[in-house]
Image: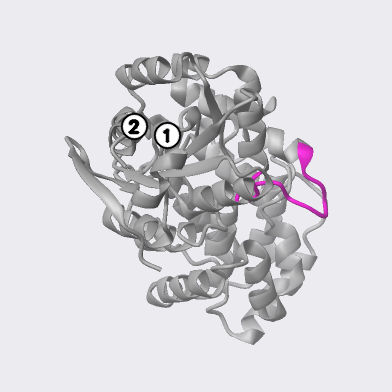
Amino acid sequence: MKHRYIEFSSPEGTCYIRNDRLKQLKEIDVVVFDCDGVLLDVRDSYSGATAETASILLEALTGTKVNPSIFDGDVFFAFKKTGHFNNDWSVTYAYVMGALSTLTDSELSTLNTSASKVEDGSPSEKLNKLREIRTPRHLHPKHIKESLIKLAESTSTGGVEAMDSLLLPRIGTNLKKLLHPRGNVGENITSTLFEEIFGGAKLFQETFGFRAQFTDKQTGYIEKEKLVLSTATVQKMEELLNGRRFGVASGSLMNSAKHALGYTIDIFPRNAQIWHEDVDAASTDSQSLHKPNGYSLLRAAQAHAPYRRVIYIGDTMADLLTTRNADKENPKFSFLGVYATTAQQETTREMFLSSGADAIAPTVNQLPLIVQKVHADGDTQ
C-alpha cells in the first residue's frame, strides 16, 4: 500500500509526514532517540570497524588477506536494511561466514576440523592457535561480495538465526562456536576483536576493565564519529514538550556512547537511557530482547510515564520494526526515520517511504519543524 505524505523542505533536505498520522503525531509528549546514526554520525566508524574485523578474521581462518574495501557501503547496507542485523558483531559474523561459504565443501570440512582443535584460552590465544593449524585457502574478492549481497537477501526476515540455518550445514558448527557474536567480550573472538578495533586500546580498557589483546593502538574508529544533535534542537524540543522528556534506546554500549556524545549524554535522564548491556541483562538464553524487539524502547519511555505518545527516532529498519513491536504492546508509539546520516541516503529515504514510516527527515534536527508542522496542519483538518 502506498501512503500519502505531506512534504516540505528544510535546509538539509525534504521532510515527510504521513497524512493519516497527523492526529496521532499531535499527541507526542516524549521523544526517544536511537544513538548511532541519529545523535551521532557514525558512517565512518561502525562500517570501518566491521570491515577491518572481518578482514583480520578471514586472514586467520584462511591465510588470504582480504581487503576491507570489499565490505563496502553496499554490503553494509544490505544487511542493515533487513532490520535483523542491528548489532555490528552480528554484521561482522555475517561477513565472515558469508565469505567462507564461497569455499568448497572439502575446504570447509577441513577448516571446521581445525576449528574443533581450538580449545580453551583467551580470544587472542584461540585465534593464534587457529593460524598455526589451519590449511591456507584462497578466497576470491569478487565472489565474496556477490555472496554477501545474496546472503543478506536470503536472511531478510530472520537475521543470524536464518543465516546459521542456511550456512551451517556446509560450514559446520565448530566455526560457529569459535566466532558466534553473542559471546561475551573478553571470551569471544568476534566481539572482543571488534570492540578493540572500534574503541582502541584505551577506551576498550576503560569500558571492559581489562587490557586489549589484539591491538596496541590507543584510539579506534569511534574517534571518527561526529555529534549531529544540535543545542538549538534540544532547546526547542524542551519548549515544545515542556521539559526534557527525552530518552535513548540504543544497541550501543553505554561507555562507548558516553565517550562519543560527551556532555550531550546529560540531557537524557539516566533512567530513560537503555543501552546494549541493559538489554543483555534482561535477555535470556531462550529470548533475546535486543532490537527489533520493542523492549528497549518501552523501557526508555517508561521513565516518562504517563505519556500520551512517544516518537522514536532511528535510521534503520531495525528501529522502525522496534517501534512497531513496541506499539503492539502499548499502542502509543510512532516512528521518525532519518536518512541523511546513513551510507545510502536516497535508498534509506525510499525504504522508509515504502515501509510507511510515520515521518521522515534528513536528520534529527528537523524534529522541531515536524512537530510544529503537525500541529499547524493538524489544526486545519
Q: Nearer the viewer, residue 137 or 194?
A: 194
| Res 112 → quadrant | bottom right
Q: Identify residue for label 2.
A: 375
Q: Tell me if residue 61 comes above or below residue 32 in the rendering.
A: below
Q: Are marks 1 and 2 in contact (CB under 8 Å)?
A: yes
What label sits on residue 347 in the rendered view? none
Rendering coords of residue 345 (x, y %): 29, 52
What's the magenta region?
Answer: 282-294
Q: Nearer the viewer, residue 51 or 339?
A: 339
Q: Tell me if residue 62 comes above or below residue 264 in the rendering.
A: below
Label 2: few (<14), some (14–19) or many (≥20) C-alpha neighbours in 10 Å? some
Q: Nearer the viewer, residue 22 or 213?
A: 22
User: Residue at left 32%, top 54%?
Assistant: 349
Label 1: few (<14), some (14–19) or many (≥20) C-alpha neighbours in 10 Å? some
Quadrant for the C terminus, please: top left
Q: Identify residue for label 1.
A: 26
Rendering coords of residue 11 (x, y %): 17, 35
Q: Secondary structure at mark 2?
A: helix
Rendering coords of residue 260 (x, y %): 45, 26
Q: Tell me if residue 264 comes above or below residue 23 in the rendering.
A: above
Q: Residue furthest front?
A: 381
**Marks 1/2: CA–CA distance:** 6 Å
User: Residue at left 50%, top 23%?
Assistant: 259
Whether residue 331 is visible to the viewer of this picture, yes or no, is: yes
**Secondary structure of the magenta portion, mostly?**
loop
Q: In screen coordinates, is 224 left or right of 80?
A: left
Q: Amino acid at mark 1?
A: Lys
Q: Earlier in the sequence, mark 1 or mark 2?
A: 1
